[in-house]
Amino acid sequence: GDSVTQMEGPVTLSEEAFLTINCTYTATGYPSLFWYVQYPGEGLQLLLKATKADDKGSNKGFEATYRKETTSFHLEKGSVQVSDSAVYFCALRSPRGNFNKFYFGSGTKLNVKP
Amino acid sequence: SQTIHQWPATLVQPVGSPLSLECTVEGTSNPNLYWYRQAAGRGLQLLFYSVGIGQISSEVPQNLSASRPQDRQFILSSKKLLLSDSGFYLCAWSGLAGVEQYFGPGTRLTVT
């Protein structure tokens, strides 16, 4: 079945460091891929998305490229800030007729130290 | 624009008491609706989803039930809460035309 695997955390970085959070997926067909961010005590917010192979999603300095050949969608940011501290979830959408089913990774907690 | 509301934001209930959590969506029609539970420090577990009024599908057997009495209203219920029902409950919606899913602010449930 469809699934998403992402690197376990927590990931601890100093401010202005480079960030990579790995995400790989298993899916039939051509899923859409997403990164969500969750701040403490809040719901998930859509960070970026990509709907087809080789698409690059980007938002707020974060980027991820849909790599079909490696079934990956790694999240990157060139220079993290303390305010980026949160839990990041990789997800895929698997459409099934009139229903969209979403599969989420287990989440990666990012701690950014000043 | 679309907005999703959940209430209450926090809830403390004794074991054996009933539960009702409500979710409403504004600004869209005929959305897919979802209930997820997130245990502390864990990922998301899909509990229920709905493709239309009165149409509910359950992903896991459990002590909870869901209902969709109106197009943009989704309710999570229990007749008797268990300690294991504690967690962070998230409602979400997606449109048939769009590809992404949008989440509400969540309800923190503590069963004592």
Image: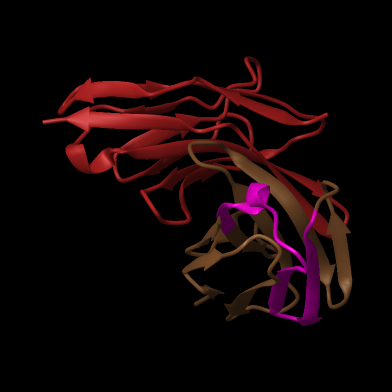
Chain colours: A red, B brown
Q: Residue at x 71, y 63 (%)?
A: B16
Q: Position of residue B29 (x, y in %)?
A: 70, 79
> Is residue A63 found left or right of B34 in the rendered image?
left
Q: Residue furthest bottom?
A: B70
Q: Residue at x 81, y 51 (%)?
A: B62
Q: Nearer the viewer, residue B50 or A54?
A: B50
> Is residue A28 found left or right of A16 in the rendered image?
right
- On screen, residue B68 above or below A26: below
* Residue A102 in magenta stretch: no
* Residue B84 in magenta stretch: yes
Q: Position of residue A110 (x, y in %)?
A: 34, 30
> Is residue A46 found left or right of A106 in the rendered image?
left
Snapshot quadrant of residue B45: top right
Q: Residue at x 57, y 31 (%)?
A: A106
Residue A21 visible in this rendered orientation of the protein: yes
Q: Position of residue A107 (x, y in %)?
A: 51, 33
> Is residue B16 found left or right of A73 in the rendered image?
right
Q: Nearer the viewer, residue B109 or B111?
A: B111
Q: Residue at x 38, y 24 (%)?
A: A10
Magenta extent: B63-89
Q: Nearer the viewer, residue B39 or A56?
A: B39
Q: Position of residue A19 (x, y in %)?
A: 31, 24
Q: Residue furthest left?
A: A114
Residue A18 visible in this rendered orientation of the protein: no
Snapshot quadrant of residue B49: bottom right
